[in-house]
Image (tube, rainbow, N blue to C red):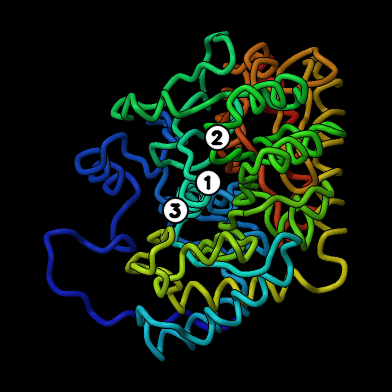
Amino acid sequence: MPKSVQAAPAAKTTATSATAMSQDALLKMAEKYIPGACVGSLYLPANLRMVMTRAEGSKLYDAGGKEYIDCMLGSGPLVIGNSHPQVVEAVQRQAALGSTYYALNEPAVKLAAKIVEAAPCGETMRFQTTGSDATEGALRIARAATGRQKVLKFEGGFNGGHDSTQFSRSSVEDLLHPESVPDSDGVPESLRQDTVIAPFNDPETTVRLIEEHRNELAAVIIEPLQRSLKPEPGFLEAVRAATEKHGIVFIFDEIVTGFRLAWGGAQERYGVVPDLACYGKAVGGGYPVSAIVGRAALMKLADPGKKGQGGPYCFLSGTMTANPIACVAGLVTLEVLEQPGTYERLFAIGERLADGIRKAARKVGVPVLVAGDGPVLQVHFTDRKELRNHRDLLKTDTKKGSQFGLEMISRGVYFTPGSKIYLSLAHTDRDIERTIEAAEDSLKAVA
């Protein structure tokens, strides 16, 4: 494996470099300067907090020297594993050529071609930087194309951190559909009025809501694999037919599923083609890049050359949009994923882990349901035989789910407690065995 590029000596600061400090010292610094002493929304109790210092393959290592089997994968992007030699080499080579241009560049052009050719809905695309940027941009395009304002999303679905989608993802109230509830303070009340909430895997209610709001709906946005819930046969097809009937833009949020469930993502796996699809995570190989892909008639609204020409125009841009380092990392990642046997391997280890956890739960005597698809799974504590939607999830024991995750972290398996487990091509058979062993011990602790 190529050696890491050695950074030039940094200017003198009041803080010592991370590698020269103990984990305790770094955590004290984090508690002082970072609210919650965490990044993103993953908040851990003080006794389980760590500062990661390096990663390789399927493993992470913290500043205290502890090794973790990485089932977080950077919240999903590292589907071929940490520090993949080909990605490291490509990033080092590109860094020497320039870190960013704010211009069309070779890696971006090649990555765009690869994504469009893989996506069943793909005709053209525009880059963004984060998954949230992509879903926000897709909704903007839909509103501009239709002249309508409202968006239908699904209860329990996460479609980015921007204001337009911060509704009813984590609601605990049995509100009447289509009423929405904000997931965060500070979200404008006006957006709440423009958000229609439907139940996942309920085609009758969803189609009825689309019909009732057909003259106001710009878009329907959906995670085709909603968190760990698979779409039931006929559900996505019914939504596709209803949106097509009324000229509503149907958006697949493929930030998680893109290039993970199949080369053509959820569109290929579930056999339903939307108007637009949002990609992130895997397409950047651990670096920040995302994309909106879809029908040329919609994507042309984001062509800056159309601005001021009398028709609708959507601003989609950012300082790091189509960053060449991120694009070259994504391009190499997709080249690895394109190799024969990739998805067979990802699904095989996913099924093996899911089966192992189920057997461990039966042995311990704890009722669980392992949901998900292929290399994305989640352990739910329930005696139910199926989970169809968000309200079913609310009836599971979510406290035990979170406790299980914390127990797993303490045993060296890292993922978000109470949430998804991600697997990569770097996970070995022994990694899966160790994870199942940790799961059995964690289930005993929970029980």
Residue 373 image-quadrant placement: top right
Q: Earlier in the sequence, mark 2 or mark 3?
A: 3
**Quadrant (top left, top right, bottom left, bottom right) of the N terminus:** bottom right
Judge the density around disc 3: few (<14), some (14-19), many (≥20) Cα neighbours within 10 Å.
Answer: many
**Is residue 65 shown to the viewer in this render?**
no
| Most foreground residue, 367 or 279 | 279
Between tags 2 and 3, which lies in front?
Answer: 2
Residue placed at 50% from the left, 54% from the top?
134
Q: Please name the residue shown 45% across and 72% down the image.
A: 322
Q: What residue did someone put label 1 on?
A: 146
Question: Disc 2 designates what residue?
Answer: 217
Whether residues under marks 1 and 2 lie with C-beta atoms below 8 angstroms apart, the answer is yes
Q: Horizontal and vertical percent for residue 318? A: 35, 65
Q: Who comes first in sequence, dot 1 or dot 3?
A: 3
**Label 3's element?**
helix
Residue 422, horizontal then vertical, whole percent: 67, 47
Q: Quadrant of the C terminus?
A: top right
In the rendered image, residue 337, in percent from the top left (x then y), is placed at 74, 68
